[in-house]
Every structure is written in C-alpha cells, then in structure tokens.
Image: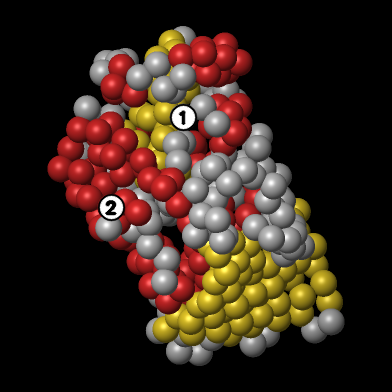
Amino acid sequence: MKKIKWGIIGCGNIANKFAADLSLFNDAELHAVASRSEDKAKQFASKHDARLAYNSYNALFNDSEIDIIYIATPHYSHAQLSIEAMEHGKHVLCEKPLGINKKEAQQMIDTSKKTNCFFMEALWTRFNPVFVEVLKRINDGEIGEVNYINADFAFLSNHALESRVFNLDLAGGALLDIGIYPVFLSYAILGIPESINARALFKKETGADIQTSMLFNYKKASAILYCGFTSHSDMTVRISGTEGQIHIHDRWHQADRFSIIKDDHTELIELTKTGLGYSHEIEECHKCLNDHKIESDLWSHQNSLDLISQLDSVREKIGLTYPMED
C-alpha cells in the first residue's frame, strides 16, 4: 500500500489532536512537521512519530516526499501559507476559516485550480457522522420544512490579551474562531440568507469581538446564532421544522448523539466517531486524492466561499476589520 505522506505546519493544540487521529490510518504517514520554533517542532515530531522536524515552513514546502500539508497556524497566515504550499505542488488541508475574508479565500481557490492541487477547508464538523446523518434526515423531510434554527458556540475564555484569541493582529475574536460553526450549520441546512442582522461586544484592550449575536433571515425561516468568549453555553443545537425537531446534543460541533422529537416522542440516535473526530476529514482528503480531485463534493470550494462571504457580511454589520485589511 502506497502511503499518503502528510506534513503539518503549526504545532498547537488542534495540530496535536489532528496528528493523533492521523496515526489511526494505515494508508497515512506523518512525514514532517514545521514550526518557527525548532524545539517545538522536534517535540511535536517526537510525540507523533514524524520522521522530520523543520524550523522553517519553506523547508517543509521543499520536501519532495510530502503529498499533502495540514495548515494549523493562526487565521491571518492561512492564505499565504496555503498558496505557497500549492505553488510548491503540495495538496492542502487548511484549518478554518479558509482566509480572513472572501478575497483571500478566492485567491487560495484560484491557486488550487491553477496548480491542480487538492484544497479543502478543514471544517471537521461537516464530516462528523452525527452531522452527516442529521443533514440526511433533514433532506429526507423527516421533520418537515425547517423554519427555525438556534445554534451557538460559547465558552468562558481565560486566554491572555496577546493570545491569538484576542489579538486583532492575528485576526482574533469570537466570530472567525468559533462563530464560524453556527454560521456553517445554518448555511448547511438553509443555504444563503436573504439578509443578516448582527450586533457585537468588543474587548476594550484589543478591539476583538468577544460576543457576536446574529439573526439570519431566510424566505421561510430564521436562524438565531451566537458566539462568545464571556460565558459557557450548553452547546446544544435546536432545529425546528413543520413536523418535528432535531436536537444535536452538547458539544454539538463534535457530537456523538442527537434526538428527533415528533408527536411528543423522542428518539435518541447515537453514532460513534473515529478517534477524536478529525479522522473523518482526513478520510475525505484521502478519498479525494485517490480520485484525483482538487475539491471535495461534501465541502466544496464554493461552500467555503459562501461561508466566508456570510462571515464578511456579519463583520460589516458589526463594524469589524482587521489591521492587515487596511
């Protein structure tokens, strides 16, 4: 069996979880990792049995053995690193959000088409077995016509002011970091809204959004969405239709169970994730590479453009720009 050789850029928390799930695949090998910190790269490589550790991203780009690179750096660097990787002939799985705005996302997708390299946003929830099954049940009409969604993503953050969470120079803030999840959910079920209303509260010291409330208006439906760093929530999604409801239980973006409520009867459905849940997007990448595709049918380039366009619209409503956009 010819193994797909992965490289990882960025050695933070999400990259560690991703690498743990990558080790579950017989047809994958973590060939190399890269960080600007040599010690961090070596520690990560040792922990996850990577063959090589680089202290520069260019060294990883120029490694001829790597097939695909997972980019897990802060938001502001996604576009530059993805484009450089593809220009070096590497396929790319880039952490969400794809870029900080639609302009960046379009440049990344254009590069994918120009280089004929596979490129996908690492929106792992899209491939979660529970989410796949919920979407199937909705599309099959199990709860009738969906007319209301309530979804949030919130937790109490104790991060330092200079961290990527609150640092506007790193495109920090709640919306791009966690607000992308409820916006994605509403888009996956209801499509593109006819109009968007939004309000936000900001971190006084840095200007990053710390609470953003959104109302997405559709022709026959509404979605109330929220993200925030100021308090915890129960992280349960409620989807209401003309013939019933679906609740995706906490934490919904990585859930292993959901309920269908119809005629005062509740049915609980439990589905098992493989590993921590990143394995399902890895499996999709392998499938696309083996089929010589440059995008996924389940989460396409257009899907990513639609999603970032909605996030751009929310930012316009709340008056949020990032320094690198000036």
Find disc 2 in the rendering and name its residue.
104
Q: Nearer the viewer, residue 110 or 245?
A: 110
**Helix, strand or loop for disc 2:** helix
Q: Amino acid at mark 2?
A: Glu
Disc tally is 2
**Would residue 169 be found to the left or right of residue 21 on screen?**
left
Q: Who's the residue at 53% across and 18% down the image?
A: 40
Q: Nearer the viewer, residue 2 or 234?
A: 234
**Disc 1 vs disc 2: Cβ atoms closer than 8 Å?**
no
Query: Badge 2 local density, few (<14 within 10 Å), some, or many (20+)?
Result: some
Residue at x 46% of width, y 29% of height? 10
Tell me the quadrant of the picture where the C terminus can be found: bottom left
User: Relative to 324, does residue 31 appear above or below in the rendering?
Assistant: above
Vertical placement of residue 247 versus 170, above or below: below
Residue 38: percent from the left, percent from the top? 46, 14
What residue is at 60 percent from the left and 66 percent from the top?
Answer: 211
Above or below, comparing residue 72 to residue 122 in the picture: above
The circle drawn on residue 226 is none
Identify the image quadrant of the N terminus. Answer: top left
Q: Quadrant of residue 289?
A: top left
Q: Residue at x 48, y 81 (%)?
A: 197
The residue tagged 1 is 10
Q: Around disc 1, counting alpha carbons within 10 Å, would you say few (fewer than 14), some (14 to 19), or many (20 or more)? A: many
Residue 49 in picture, x, y percent from top left: 55, 13
Residue 195 picture quarter: bottom left
Could you tell me if residue 123 is visible in this image?
A: no
Question: How is this picture coloured?
Answer: secondary structure
- The amino acid at mark 1 is Gly
Q: Is residue 261 above or below residue 25?
A: below
Which comes sooner in the sequence, label 1 or label 2? 1
- Residue 100 lies, in percent from the top left, at 37, 54
Q: Quadrant of residue 278?
A: top right
